[in-house]
Amino acid sequence: MKNGFGITALLLLFLFFSCATRGEIKRFKLQLDYLEQSNADIQKRLTRLDSLQNEQLKLAHTISANMDYNMKMVQDEITLVRNALQESGYRAEQLTKKIESVSEELSRKIATPADTLDTLAQNRDLSETVYRQAYLEQTRGNYQIAIAKYKDFIDRYQESAYIDDAYYQLGECYFTLGEYKNALESYLQIPRSFNSSPLVPPALYKAALSYRELGKNTSAKSLLNRLIKDYPNSNEARLAKERLKNWGR
């Protein structure tokens, strides 16, 4: 009887430990599954973070590239404005010199004998009228008409105070129309025939640009260097230096 009871006790004890072991294994498995799931979630989050970091890097590169591009655009605009101001500057300078030239001519005419004064005044008024008509057509964009009027003025009024202006504006009309050879001839007439004119520096500068358009780069650079040497303090000399820098000396 005692032996039977002992066996029964052993069986009960074995069953108890067996149940306990299976329960522990089940709990361990559940914990393992939970850890694996947690690791998977963490891995997904890490992958997402990597993706976000890559997107941020791409965005940063894009913003940097756009900033560089915008800065270049701003720098280009500043250069254009500076050139425009310089162009305006030499226009104002040549206008001032032209006023001085006309004043000198008037002073000379005051000393002219009275019997010829009326004739000179009439010729001056007529030549000025013809010149202004040509210039008006030019400002309206009627370049062919302006060219014809400038040529007529040059043929009739070689002694006019506006003769150098006529050659220069004739060159401007040709240059605007893309007739660079004719423009070149008109511009060069000023330093050849009117070397004391205030229009010599701008004429040399525009003649150099005409050479450039004609594909004669050596002549263009040579003329700009001449301009810088002979008229170092002119606005055109500063423009010439910039052109040479851009073209490559």
Image (cartoon, rainbow, N blue to C red):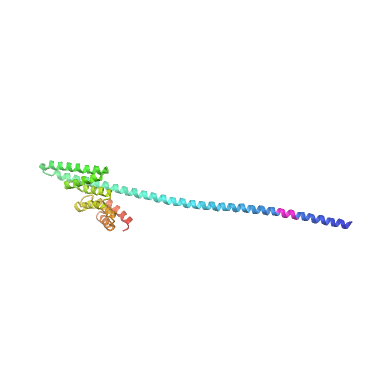
Name the residue at 46% across, 51% down. 62
Please give the count of numbered marks on the rendered protein.
Answer: 0
Residue farthest along the right direction in this orientation: 1
The N terminus - image quarter? bottom right
Name the residue at 69% across, 54% down. 29
Query: In this orientation, which residue lies closer to the viewer: 116 or 106?
Result: 116
x, y percent for residue 133:
22, 42
Query: In this orientation, which residue lies closer to the viewer: 87 or 146?
Result: 146
x, y percent for residue 5:
86, 55
Name the residue at 64% across, 52% down. 37
Q: Decide if residue 4 is on the left or right side of residue 22.
A: right
x, y percent for residue 45:
58, 51
Query: In this orientation, which residue lies closer to the viewer: 163 or 181?
Result: 181
On the image, which quarter does residue 146 sit in?
top left
In the image, is residue 73 part of the stretch drawn in magenta?
A: no
Magenta range is 21-27
The C terminus - image quarter? bottom left
x, y percent for residue 235:
28, 51
Would residue 166 be seen by someone viewing this image from the given angle?
A: yes
Q: Decide if residue 44 is on the left or right side of residue 96.
A: right
